[in-house]
Amino acid sequence: MLKNLAIMASTLAVAGAAFAVDMGNVAQKFELKDGSTVYVFKDGKMAMEDRLGRTVGMKAGHVMETKDGQKIIMVGNELARLEMIKAEKRGN
C-alpha cells in the first residue's frame, strides 16, 4: 500500500508541474477603465482580476474597454490559470 501511495504521489507531482508550467503563458495584459486587469493567454483565452487584485469571473462575449479606449471581447474564463499564476508569484 505504501508503494502505491508513493507512486500516486510522484505521478501527481509530475502532472502538477506540467500543469503549472502551462499557467504562465500570458501573452498580453490589458488595464481596463474601471481599474481591472485582463490577462490574455497564448491560446487566446482570458482571465480577469478586479482593481483590488481579486480574480473575478466574466462571461464569454462580454465587451470591456481598456484605458486607451480599445474594446476587448472576453474569450473564455480561465480563473484557475490566473489563480495558479498568482500563487506562483506568492510562492505557494
Image: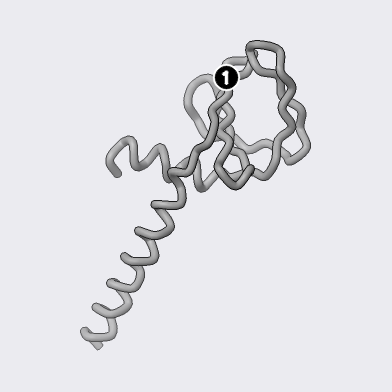
Q: Is residue 63 left or right of residue 91?
A: right
Up-down: is 79 above or below 72?
below
Q: Residue at x 57, y 19 (%)?
A: 31
Viewer-closest of 72 and 60: 72
Residue density around tag 1, few if under 14, some if 14–19, many if 20 or more, within 10 Å: some
Q: Residue at x 31, y 36 (%)?
A: 90
User: Where does the C terminus fall, quadrant-wise?
Assistant: top left
Up-down: is 79 above or below 68?
below
User: Which corner quadrant of the image does residue 3 belong to?
Assistant: bottom left
Instruction: Find residue 76 and report its horizontal and vertical position in percent.
Output: 67, 45
Q: Residue furthest top?
A: 68
Q: Is residue 21 left or right of residue 5?
A: right
User: Where does the N terminus fall, quadrant-wise?
Assistant: bottom left
User: Would you name the residue on which mark 1 appears?
Assistant: 31
Q: Amino acid at mark 1?
A: Glu
Q: Is residue 87 left or right of residue 31?
A: left
Viewer-closest of 26 and 64: 26
Up-down: is 81 above or below 90?
below
Instruction: Find residue 22 and report its horizontal and vertical position in percent.
Output: 45, 52
Instruction: Find residue 61 and report its horizontal and vertical position in percent.
Output: 78, 37
Q: Residue at x 71, y 27 (%)?
A: 72
Identify the element where label 1 is drawn. strand
Colour scheme of this structure image?
one colour
Up-down: is 18 above or below 33?
below
